[in-house]
Structure formats: C-alpha cells, structure tokens
Image: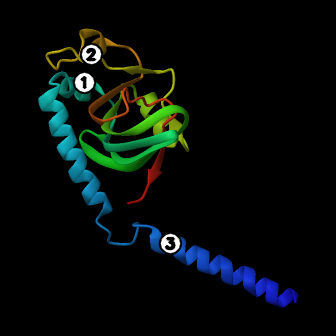
C-alpha cells in the first residue's frame, strides 16, 4: 500500500508540474519579451507626447519601470495584473509583473498604465534586489495639470521614486498603486 501511495503522490506531482509548466508562456525562444518591449515603446511614446515633462523626468531618473497595461477588476474582492519592463538609459534590463489583491467596496473593471521613475541609484538598486517590492511611502505621485504638463514640484522633487498613473479607462475610479507587488519575470 505504501508503494502505491508513493507512486500516486509522485504521479500527481509530475502531472501537476507538467501542467503548470505547460501553462507558462516562458518557453525558450518565446516572443514574450519582444511583445512587452513593443508595448513599452508605444506607452513611452504616448507618455512623452501627452505629458512632455516626462521626457525630462526620464533623463533625470536612474531607471524607469514602464507598465503598459494593468487590468484591475473587482466585485468586493478584486485584483490587478500586468507586465512591463525596467529600462535604464532606454534599454530594457529586466521584465516585471505587477500584482495587487484587495478587499473592499469595489465593483467594476479598469485598465491603466503607469510608470515608476527611480530618481536615485539607491532606489533603483533597492527595487532590483528585492523579492516582491511594493510602492511605499518613499514614492510621490506625479500630478499633471490640465495642459498635460507635470507640475514644477514633480520635476524638482527629492523623492526617490515618482509614480505616474495615466491612460485610465473603465468603471473603477482612481487607480492607485498602493499594495501592488512587483516581481521580476522571465518572459
């Protein structure tokens, strides 16, 4: 009987592991990274054309995490997910996923993009070396005026991380990044 139960456990683990790996789009020679980079390029172009001050902000930053599309949905219990790329000198160095789960009064769905500007090498290093980094009190949310320009305070801030949420569409008002966890992925 012991031999049968061991075989069953092993069989279950092998089957579950195979199914999990089959569900991943992380195969060798996959085009996941290429697709993410294309979306980041489009998002970056949109950001610079819509909010011209962001180009200057990027030049001052040690690195920028672009998250082209975050999808958030909820009915009392909600969550969000998206993928993006960390760029240093506009070169992709890593890919990340953003995950958020929450409970509360929420009904609907929303999509948005965001960018995290790491203004110091220390903030960038902390992000890159952490396992499950989340936006904290050391981040400032950028404010955009009606003309599509960043406020002067944003461009001269001494905060280590500047977060900009933009291109919101959907039925849940006010996208926030609080509680969002970022993890490095291999697309």
> Which of pointers 1 and 2 lies earlier in the amino acid sequence?
1
Q: CA distance from mark 1 to mark 3?
A: 40 Å
Q: Residues within 10 Å of mark 2 (few under 14, many from 20)?
A: some
Between circles 1 and 3, the one closer to the viewer is 3
- Tell me the SS state at disc 1: helix
Residue placed under numbered mark 1 in the picture: 57
Please tell me which residue lies in front, 5 or 32: 5
Dividing the picture into quarters, in which one does residue 66 lie?
top left
- What is the x, y in percent for residue 68? 28, 43
Residue at the disc numbered 3:
21
Quadrant including the N terminus: bottom right
Residue 80 against residue 4 in the figure, above or below: above
The residue beneath circle 2 is: 155
* Left or right for 138, reference 95: right
Residue 71 at x, y percent in the picture: 37, 44
98 relative to 29, above or below: above
Q: CA distance from mark 2 to mark 3?
A: 44 Å
Question: What element does badge 2 sit on?
Answer: helix
Q: Is residue 133 visible?
A: yes
**Where in the figure is residue 132, as x and y percent of width and height?**
54, 42
Residue, x 16% and y 20% (percent of image)? Answer: 148
Residue contact between numbered discs 1 and 2, judged by CB atoms under 8 Å: yes
In percent of width and height, residue 112 lies at 31, 37
Does any portion of residue 100 appear in the rendered image?
no
Q: CA distance from mark 1 to mark 2?
A: 6 Å
Q: Considering depth in this image, is 175 or 47 the residue closer to the camera?
A: 175
On screen, residue 79 versus residue 70, left or right, reads right
10 Å crowding of disc 3: few (<14), some (14-19), many (20+): few
């Amino acid at each position: 009987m012991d031999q049968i139960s061991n075989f069953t456990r092993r069989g279950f683990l092998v089957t579950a592991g195979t199914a999990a790996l089959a569900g991943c789009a992380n195969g060798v020679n996959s085009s996941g990274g290429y697709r993410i980079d294309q979306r980041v390029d489009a998002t970056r172009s949109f950001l610079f054309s819509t909010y011209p001050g962001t180009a200057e902000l990027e030049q001052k930053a040690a690195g920028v995490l672009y998250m082209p599309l975050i999808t958030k949905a909820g009915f009392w219990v909600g969550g969000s997910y998206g993928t993006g790329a960390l760029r240093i000198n506009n070169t992709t160095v890593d890919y990340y996923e953003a995950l958020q789960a929450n409970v509360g009064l929420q009904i609907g769905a929303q999509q948005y993009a965001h960018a995290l500007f790491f203004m110091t090498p220390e903030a960038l290093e902390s992000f890159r070396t952490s396992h499950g980094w989340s936006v904290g009190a050391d981040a400032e949310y950028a404010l955009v005026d009606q003309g599509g320009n960043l406020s002067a305070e944003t461009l001269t801030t001494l905060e280590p991380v500047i977060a900009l949420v933009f291109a919101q569409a959907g039925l849940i008002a006010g996208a926030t990044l609080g509680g969002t966890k970022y993890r490095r992925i291999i697309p």
